[in-house]
Image (cartoon, grey):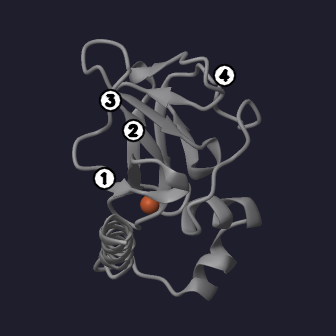
Amino acid sequence: MKPIFVALIAFLMYFSACGQNKQNANSKKKMEFPIKKTDDEWKKSLNEEQYRVLRLKGTERAFTGKFYKHKDKGIYVCAGCGNELFKSETKFESGTGWPSYYDVIPNAVVLETDYSYGMVRTEVMCAKCGGHLGHVFDDGPKPTGLRYCINSVSLDFKKK
Ligand code: FE
């Protein structure tokens, strides 16, 4: 009987610990951004797909975005607020089907740990409006070794 009892206690502790973690993640303080709009205002200023990705942290289907093969010289800006995010010189072909950059314009984005879908990833958000842009990974090329994997739909482009 005793080993079963110990196992039961361990089992309960394990699950209560998991519950705790989840609660901490959910009760995380909401981040504040300089550009504040209500949900309705965002819905009016964005198209449906932009709203789904930028505001609901969605992901566009790989190889479908307008910028994954884009090679013009210029600046990629936030589709939500126009904040300048990435220079075309830092764009590279990652083979992932999403526009990828090895660097970001200083202070243009904020990063946050993202625990969704059973993965631990680093989310990239626009520093001005909080719009979801994509994720950053540490398997990028030199000189930074970073790969900013960004949804085309979260971006606009200003040609040089
Ligand atoms: Fe923005």
Q: Amino acid at mark 4?
A: Lys
What amino acid is labelled 1 in the image? Leu
49 or 16, nearer to the observer: 16
- Name the residue beneath numbered marker 3: 103
146 to 108, vertically: above or below: above
Which labelled disc corresponds to residue 136? Answer: 2
> Which quadrant of the figure contains the N terminus?
bottom left
Q: Which mark is residue 111?
A: 1
Disc nearest the viewer among 4 and 2: 2
| Residue 74, horizontal then vertical, whole percent | 47, 29
For ligand 1, give the image quadrant: bottom left
Contact, mark 1 vs mark 4 (Cβ under 8 Å): no
Which label belongs to residue 69? 4
- The response on whether ligand 1 sits within 8 Å of label 3 is no
Determine crowd level at label 4: few under 14, some 14-19, many 20+ residues with C-alpha closer than 10 A: some
Q: Are marks 1 and 2 in contact (CB under 8 Å)?
A: yes
Q: Earlier in the sequence, mark 3 or mark 1?
A: 3
Residues under labels 4 and 2: Cα distance? 19 Å
Could you say whether the residue bearing mark 2 is in a helix, strand or loop? strand
The residues tagged by marks 3 and 4 sit, at their Cα atoms, a distance apart of 17 Å
Residue at 25 percent across and 21 percent down: it is 144
The Cα–Cα distance between marks 1 and 4, rounded to whole angstroms, is 25 Å
Nearer-the-camera pick, 85 or 150: 150
Could you tell me the amino acid type at mark 2? Val
Q: Earlier in the sequence, mark 4 or mark 2?
A: 4
Q: Where 50 sits versus 87, above or below? A: below
Q: Is residue 102 left or right of residue 74?
A: left
What percent of the width, then of the height, locates residue 83? 40, 54
Q: What element does badge 3 sit on?
A: loop
Considering only order in the chain, which callout, 3 or 2, is on the residue closer to the N terminus? 3
Q: Are marks 3 and 1 in contact (CB under 8 Å)?
A: no
